[in-house]
Amino acid sequence: MTDLNNASVGFDALGLPENLVSAVKALGFENSTAIQAQTIPPLLQGKDVLGEAQTGTGKTAAFGLPALAKIDVSIRKPQLMVLAPTRELAIQVAEAIETFAKNMKGLKVATLYGGQSYQPQFQQLERGAQVVVGTPGRLMDHLRRKSLKLDNLSFCVLDEADEMLNMGFLEDIEWILEHLPKETQMALFSATMPAQIRKVANRFLKNPEHIKIAAVKQAKANITQYAWKVSGINKMTALERIAETFDYDAMIIFVRTRNDTIEVAEKLERAGYASVALNGDMNQAQRERTVDQLKSGVSSILVATDVVARGLDIPRISLVINYDLPGDNEAYVHRIGRTGRAGRSGTSISFVRPREMYSLRHYERLTSGTVEMYNLPNIQEIGKARIERTLTELTGVVADKDLASMREIIETMASESELSMTDLAAALLYQKQLKQPLQPKEDPKPRRDARERNDRNDSRGGRNDSRGGRNEARGGRDSRNDNRTERAPRKAKVARSDVDWQTYRLEVGKEHGARPGDIVGAIANEISLDSSYIGAINLHDKHSFVQLPKGMPDKSFTQLKRVRVRRQALEITVSDVQPSSDRPARSRKEQRTN
């Protein structure tokens, strides 16, 4: 077992092809991390690897680079498959691999996860993706449908294996690994090594090189970490308020996808904030120009994805906004590390949905710090800041400009109109503030959506909150255990007597381990239906009945046919049976274990 924690080896000394080394250097990386230095050579040699390393160590490049080195782009079939516990991590890994492979013409990556339509995923696979990154549940679906074929697979990676174990994916993982070609090279990465993970490693890995990187606490004493719990107003409005009131020199806003970088930057520009986007679709010259704009002060806001921002070192960045939470804790450390540079102090603010609150405990442990709750400025504070800013602006004009002719004009106006100077000044001020009112409108009353209403435990920090957050990240169809998260709300949003119900039969029942909460969660998540529009549920041994509003769109009906509860397809059909109300009769004990 290798146990080296301070390896500092240049990427060009690890045996990687030049096209991959140049891609990594273009991101600003010269030297490898410990896990990369110890993992890349044995993987290049064809050995299996069991990697034990905490988040924040650079595991994606550790397996992604040697795997890419072995891919034949002329073969338009999956050759590398990566299993990730959440859709966010799957997206992040896929984008990182695409960035590493920017010099590999013809390489295509397919990202497969629940909560997304199958059609675009079918298209990605049909176009000949050589790399497949996905969550276990959706990978299983594609394997069963034979839309994903592994005949040419030469490399398979289990990323964050302990997280997949905690989320109940163990049986799914074993099922998938049983379908790999015998000669497939394996890499398993995990922050911890519980007995069940060791069992998987012993069964599926062939004489693996065990590489262990000891945990190193990431000291972030000069970075103040905040979290704003998303509620009441949308994230874009919150972002604009922070940009308007927070005292920052320059900020980076982290979003999940490349398209999001452009969308958020454009919205900020329209709101009057000089913003630029940085993403993997930009060539090196474009990236350098964008970074130069931030360094020089031409722009003060950069909207970026994780991968392209990891090499940034701009001392004037004093604020980091996690507009979307990262897919893993490793990315969080890299993100907030973009501020507090060169001995300066910095601040990070994470936008956290109720079901994501469990992540804060991980961030605190990893950074040896605390994450305080952030109180977003209210309209009174916004109005006060705008008035003060306007006064400062006007005071500057009085001090720096010759206003003699303007005074004559205003005096003439007052004399001819018989208006007071105060009235004229008020009228001018009114015209000036039309685009950005000095007295903003009242905030809308908080309105929780269907998913947020199910997060009863988010403020308690209990186990259900943690598991709920993980399941939300995975997506409804991907989970064998969505019942842990999705519950009927305590109070219905609408009166059930006001709904015109239709009864449907579902091909899942007690013998499959299904409970009412499973069905509520699966339906609510899949077709974005408010839980209060799911009526009585009656469970039988091998099937169930559920009441849903009449007139369900064909698209929603088709979607529900494919949804799985307890690994059993719903196969929904219309029925004339009138179910009794099993769902409201659930006991408190069942609600807790549900």
Image (cartoon, helix red, strand yellow):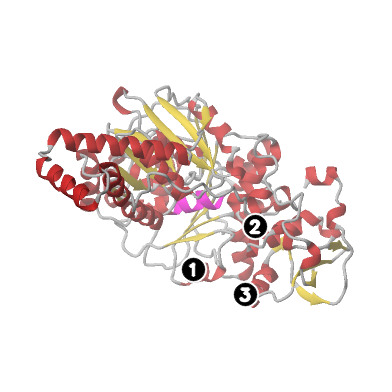
Contact (Cβ within 8 Å) of mark 3 with mark 1:
no
Give residue 425's quadrant in the image: top left
Label 2's element?
loop
In the picture of the structure, the residue carrying the numbered disc 2 is: 476
For the point 23% across and 52% down, the residue is 417
Badge 1: how crowded within 10 Å, few (<14), some, or many (20+)? many
Between marks 2 and 1 in the image, the one whose residue lies nearer the viewer: 2
The three-letter code of the residue at mark 3 reads Lys
- Counting residues from the N terminus, which is met first, the one under dot 3 or under dot 1? 1
Contact (Cβ within 8 Å) of mark 3 with mark 2:
no
For the point 84% across and 42% down, the residue is 589
In the picture of the structure, the residue carrying the numbered disc 1 is: 125
For the point 87% across and 67% down, the residue is 579
Q: Can the viewer see residue 270? A: yes
Give the main secondary structure of the magenta stretch. Answer: helix
Label 3's element?
helix
How far apart marks 3 and 2 lie (CA) works out to 17 Å
The reply, left or right, for residue 273 in relation to residue 94 is left
The three-letter code of the residue at mark 1 reads Leu
* Residues in magenta, as a range: 86-94
Q: Nearer the viewer, residue 410 or 345?
A: 410
